[in-house]
Image (cartoon, grey):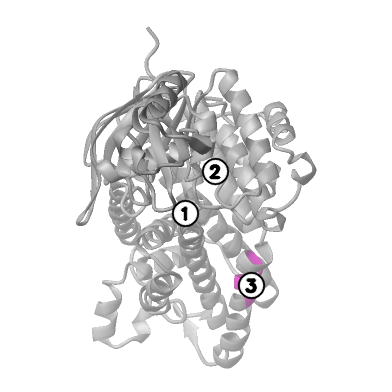
């Protein structure tokens, strides 16, 4: 049986008085597109740092593709590519030099064919000889992605890769990451753009104060925490409460819907109560509502 | 080539390239500095001072200047590389790959030794027109050059990891490295000092590095080169163990 791409058991980490990770358990299967969400300070970056060896956890087990990140760190790191959150670069080198150096760190020589392919896919071919200082923020961000990929890691962690990136680049980047995922790479993504996570991730974990407060498929999370809703303006608003709705200050009544099949019985209920619908709109469930709901409950 | 060796060699090459790409500043400038010292001190003192009996002051001075430049630049290489990487954040590119802390240490220290040697050889070359320098025992020159560079390279790793800002690194350099170097007998033989200061010099490990290095040129020194080698070796072992322990713990690198 294939080991999970990522396995975290009882992870804990404290920075002074701050408990950054407080017993996190997490498993990401190979080939998944996994989202790690949470407000600032929830522990996402600490978790990624502990997985990648940038931070030393106080306790717990961290494995990449079955390799312990402490006792078998060479194999664990060879299987992991990390795109860091900060826009960092080495000002002494050109893009190609950096990618060759990064390949060498992972024990790979003569990697130019793969480097050329990455550059092509990230639309960086024309900038291969340019010094990092001469690149725009968006291009630097793409070089960070390229650096994470030079050793063809099966597991790729992207820590807020689209922060401050324009729409065109963001779409190009996601197209490339999706392709990597289709090719079998496991992708772990942290982002504050929840619509991105909703569109891309098959499964999502939500963290708050160093704990996992929700972990499920994106579909289940949407279903469990934020159903659809029907908003109507009735000729007799006072009937809203009697028929299971909540009357808002603007005169609209909102009715939760678990699924579209519930719509017809609700309309029948309103008809039977003698209410006439003046206006109507159906609200879609979205991850933002799930996120707000989960965070408020946790 | 084994992939571990490729990783280590790449980090070493990158560290060498880092200073080589700005060699005007990292090699040329210190050579010019040493040349200025040489011109000024030799002009002022050459006719008035002889050392070890009949060695002209300028000849005595050159090995000291070579070693001083070597030591200071070996320190500057590892310390500046690490603090720049820490402050700009690009240190993560070295921390994420499967490099061991021993490979990390060896790459930074060897690159420092190489920069020190480049500068030292540069100073030696520019001093040729001014002085006829013997080389009585080249093996000692090489041994002390290597050990001195490795000691200062290790100190540079320690300082680069410890310092959180350039200010702290400058403090380390100006209040520790510089006084120890300047008061180590670069410009004088400790036999010209009062007895008390001779004793003080003997607790400065830099004195032994420079004295042993000078022995390689003149076949004469203030103390036995074997004693100097023993002190310098002990010093290196102590600093290597300390630096490796810091790196193994991930002190200030892996939070």
Q: Main secondary structure of the magenta part?
A: helix
Dot 1 falls on a residue whose secondary structure is helix
* Left/right of residue B128 with respect to residue A222 in the rendered view: right
Question: Mark 1 highlights which residue?
Answer: B146
- Give the percent coordinates (x, y) of residue B50: 49, 84
Q: CA distance from mark 2 to mark 1?
A: 45 Å
Seen from this angle, which residue lies furthest front?
A274
Q: CA distance from mark 2 to mark 3?
A: 41 Å
Could you classify mark 3 by the number of other residues whose Cα lies within 10 Å: few (under 14), some (14-19), or many (20 or more)? few
Marks 2, 3: nearer the viewer:
2
Could you classify mark 1 by the number of other residues whose Cα lies within 10 Å: few (under 14), some (14-19), or many (20 or more)? some
The answer to whether the residues at label 1 and label 3 have Cβ atoms under 8 Å apart is no
Image quadrant holding the N terminus of chain A, namely: top left
- Give the percent coordinates (x, y) of residue A252: 44, 45
Identify the residue at image location x=68%, y=66%: B24
Marks 2, 1: nearer the viewer:
2
The residues colored magenta run B27-32
Q: Chain of mark 2?
A: A
Identify the residue at image location x=56%, y=58%: B115
Q: Chain of mark 1?
A: B
Question: Mark 2 highlights which residue?
Answer: A161
Instruction: Mark 1 or mark 3: name the one nearer the start of the chain.
Output: 3
Dot 3 falls on a residue whose secondary structure is helix
Residue A268 appears in the rendering? yes
- Give the percent coordinates (x, y) of residue A125: 77, 39
Question: Mark 3 highlights which residue?
Answer: B29
With respect to residue A134, does A243 lie above or below?
above
* Left/right of residue B105 with respect to residue B10 in the rendered view: left
């Amino acid at each position: 049986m294939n080991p999970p791409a990522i396995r975290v058991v009882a992870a804990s980490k404290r920075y002074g008085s701050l408990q950054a990770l407080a017993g996190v358990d997490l498993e990401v299967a190979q080939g998944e597109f996994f989202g790690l969400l949470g407000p600032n300070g929830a522990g996402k970056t600490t978790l990624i740092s502990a997985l990648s060896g940038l931070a030393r956890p106080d306790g717990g087990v961290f494995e990449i593709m079955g390799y312990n990140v402490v006792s078998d760190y060479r194999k664990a790191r060879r299987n992991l590519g990390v795109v860091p959150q900060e826009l960092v670069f080495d000002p002494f080198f050109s893009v190609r030099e950096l990618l060759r150096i990064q390949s060498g760190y992972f024990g790979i020589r003569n990697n130019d064919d793969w480097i050329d392919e990455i550059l092509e896919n990230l639309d960086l071919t024309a900038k291969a000889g340019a010094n990092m200082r001469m690149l725009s923020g968006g291009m630097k961000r793409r070089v960070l992605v390229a650096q994470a990929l030079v050793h063809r890691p099966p597991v790729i962690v992207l820590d807020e890769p689209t922060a401050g990136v324009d729409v065109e680049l963001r779409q190009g980047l996601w197209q490339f990451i999706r392709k990597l995922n289709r090719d079998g790479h496991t992708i772990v993504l942290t982002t504050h753009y929840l619509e991105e996570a909703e569109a891309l991730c098959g499964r999502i974990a939500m963290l708050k104060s160093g704990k996992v407060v929700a972990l499920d498929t994106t579909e289940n999370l949407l279903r469990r925490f934020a159903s659809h809703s029907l908003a109507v303006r009735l000729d007799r608003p006072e009937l809203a409460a009697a028929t299971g709705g909540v009357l808002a200050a603007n005169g609209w009544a909102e009715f939760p819907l678990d699924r579209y099949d519930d719509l017809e019985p609700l309309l029948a209920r309103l008809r039977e109560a003698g209410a006439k619908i003046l206006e109507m709109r159906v609200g879609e469930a979205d991850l933002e509502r799930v996120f707000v709901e989960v965070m408020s409950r946790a | 080539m084994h992939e571990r060796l490729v990783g280590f060699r790449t980090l070493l090459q990158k560290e060498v390239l880092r200073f080589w790409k700005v060699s005007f500043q990292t090699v040329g400038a210190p050579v010019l500095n040493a040349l200025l010292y040489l011109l000024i001190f030799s002009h002022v003192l050459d006719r008035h001072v002889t050392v070890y009996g009949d060695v002209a002051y300028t000849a005595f001075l050159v090995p000291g200047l070579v070693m001083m430049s070597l030591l200071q630049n070996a320190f500057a290489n590892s310390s500046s590389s690490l603090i720049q990487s820490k402050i700009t954040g690009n240190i993560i590119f070295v921390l994420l790959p499967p490099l061991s802390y021993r490979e990390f240490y060896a790459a930074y220290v060897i690159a420092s030794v190489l920069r020190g040697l480049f500068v030292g050889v540069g100073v030696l070359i520019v001093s040729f027109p001014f002085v006829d320098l013997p080389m009585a025992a080249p093996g000692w020159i090489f041994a002390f050059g290597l050990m001195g560079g490795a000691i200062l390279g290790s100190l540079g790793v320690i300082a680069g990891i410890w310092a959180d800002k350039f200010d702290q690194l400058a403090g380390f350099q100006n209040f520790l490295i510089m006084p120890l170097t300047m008061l180590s007998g670069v410009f004088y033989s400790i036999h010209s000092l009062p007895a008390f200061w001779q004793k003080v010099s003997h607790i400065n490990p830099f004195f032994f590095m420079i004295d042993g290095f000078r022995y390689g040129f003149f076949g004469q020194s203030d103390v036995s080169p074997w004693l100097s080698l023993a002190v310098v070796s002990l010093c290196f072992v102590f600093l290597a163990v300390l630096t490796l322990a810091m790196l193994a713990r991930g002190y200030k690198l892996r939070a």
